[in-house]
Image (cartoon, rainbow, N blue to C red):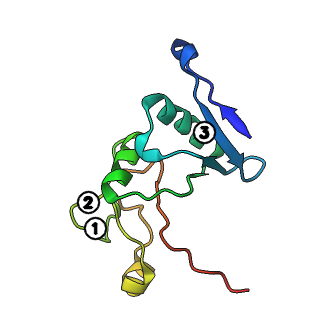
């Protein structure tokens, strides 16, 4: 399925077409064939509209450095610290790694981010390794 984002009235000549695969009737979608490191403002606006409409969106095949991750997140607002208790990665406090092998005890008690200084309107995550589910 291809979705043409509805532009604002002032931007009628700059509609952006995203190649989107819905994951259900109302929630979730995959945005295909896009490199989030090199999107322009119009594409970011189309992604934002899709995100608000589908609630969760995925971009497969992205290989983002922490700097790339923060740059992409910044297209949608000011990034906050990654977690109010768990420290962010070196030189990038906005990014924290969820690695249960490295800190199982710390994560077990600190998954909640409601104590953060600023509330979050959205979250951007990158999955590096997905454990196999038991059959």
User: x and y percent of residue 118 in the render?
Assistant: 35, 50
Q: What residue is drawn where x is 56% and y is 14%?
A: 13
Q: CA distance from mark 1 to mark 2?
A: 5 Å
Foreground pick, 57 / 63? 63
Please identify the residue farthest to the left as the structure is shown. Answer: 91
Q: Helix, strand, or loop for circle 3?
A: helix
Foreground pick, 14 / 100? 14
Residue 7 vs residue 85: left or right?
A: right
Q: CA distance from mark 2 to mark 3?
A: 27 Å
Quadrant of the frame with the N terminus = top right
Please identify the residue farthest to the right as the structure is shown. Answer: 25
Which label was assigned to residue 32?
none
Q: What residue is drawn where x is 26% and y is 60%?
A: 92
User: x and y percent of residue 110 in the render?
Assistant: 40, 74
* Tally of marks: 3
Which label was assigned to residue 89?
1
Q: Earlier in the sequence, mark 1 or mark 3?
A: 3
- The residue under label 2 is 92
Quadrant of the frame with the C terminus = bottom right
User: x and y percent of residue 39 in the render?
Assistant: 45, 38
Q: Helix, strand, or loop for circle 2?
A: loop
- The residue under label 3 is 50
The image quadrant of residue 17 is top right
Q: Helix, strand, or loop for circle 1?
A: loop
Question: Pointers 1 and 2 in contact (CB under 8 A)?
Answer: yes
Q: What residue is drawn where x is 58% and y is 46%?
A: 33
Q: Earlier in the sequence, mark 2 or mark 3?
A: 3
Q: CA distance from mark 1 to mark 3?
A: 29 Å
Q: What residue is drawn where x is 55% and y is 52%?
A: 59
């Amino acid at each position: 399925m291809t979705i043409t984002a509805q532009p604002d009235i002032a931007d009628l000549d700059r509609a952006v077409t995203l190649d989107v695969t819905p994951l259900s009737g109302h929630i979730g979608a995959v945005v295909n064939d896009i490199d989030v490191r090199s999107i322009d403002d119009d594409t970011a606006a189309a992604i934002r509209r899709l995100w608000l409409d589908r609630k969760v969106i995925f971009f497969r095949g992205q290989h983002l450095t922490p700097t790339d991750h923060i740059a992409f997140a910044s297209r949608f607002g000011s990034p906050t610290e990654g977690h109010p208790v768990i420290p962010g990665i070196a030189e990038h406090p906005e990014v924290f790694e969820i690695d249960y092998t490295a800190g199982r005890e710390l994560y077990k008690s600190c998954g909640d981010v409601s104590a953060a200084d600023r509330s979050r309107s959205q979250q951007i995550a990158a999955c590096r390794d997905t454990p196999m589910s038991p059959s």
